[in-house]
Image: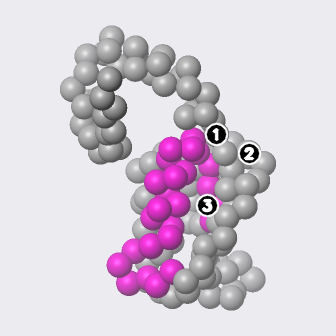
Amino acid sequence: KASHVVTRNQAIIETAKLSKDKKIQLIMILSADKDYLKMKNLHINISGKVQGVFFRASTKATADFLGIKGWVKNVPDGGVAIEAEGDEFALGEFLTFCKRGPDDAVVEKVTIDEGQLKNYRNFELLKKSS
């Protein structure tokens, strides 16, 4: 059998074409894959030219698009701190964004630590911490 790899965008487009019954079947199939839907909490610290380049706003927009919950804020050392919660697939896509940032950013280092789930309800852009 040939294996077929589908990108997330292709999957979204194809899913939109499905009937309600087919969407329910797809959700049931994906629900059976516990790792795919497993929620995680990540603490992400980003250094480089990441302040004054719309990094936080772009991070929030990306998080909202992917269904990631948590927060982003500037930190005194010139970096950005993020706490993000979501499923493994969404977090993987989110981390891809974090490693490159918006157009004017220069990401030098990204550190990632797994934390305890806090069940955030949305993704917030926080004020700079002191």
Tag shown at residue 71: 3
Image quadrant of residue 75?
bottom right
Where in the figure is residue 23, as x and y percent of width and height? 35, 19
Mark 2 and mark 1 in contact? Answer it, CB < 8 Å.
yes
Where in the figure is residue 19, as x and y percent of width and height? 25, 16
- Disc 3 secondary structure class: strand
Tag shown at residue 117: 2
Q: Residue furthest right?
A: 116
Q: Residue furthest front?
A: 1
Where in the figure is residue 124, as x and y percent of width and height? 57, 59
Asked if 10 appears above or below 105 in the picture, the reply is above
Q: Residue at 67% across / 64% down in the picture? A: 112
Where in the figure is residue 43, as x and y percent of width and height? 69, 62
Asked if 109 appears above or below 94 in the picture, the reply is below
Instruction: Indicate the amino acid at tag 2.
Output: Leu
Q: Which residue is mark 1?
A: 39
Q: Counting other residues with Cα less than 10 Å from the Cα at mark 2, is it few (<14), some (14-19), or many (20 or more)?
A: few
Mark 3 and mark 2 in contact? Answer it, CB < 8 Å.
no
> What residue range appears in magenta?
82-107
Q: Residue at 48% across / 16% down in the picture? A: 28
Instruction: Indicate the amino acid at tag 1.
Output: Met
Separation of residues labelled 3 and 1 (CA atoms): 16 Å
Q: Counting other residues with Cα less than 10 Å from the Cα at mark 1, is it few (<14), some (14-19), or many (20 or more)?
A: some
Of badges 3 and 2, the one in the foreground is 2
Instruction: Indicate the amino acid at tag 3.
Output: Trp
Separation of residues labelled 2 and 1 (CA atoms): 8 Å
Magenta stretch contains residue 1: no
- Disc 1 secondary structure class: strand
Separation of residues labelled 3 and 2 (CA atoms): 13 Å
Asked if 110 appears above or below 92 in the picture, the reply is below
Q: Residue at 62% across / 88% down in the picture? A: 78
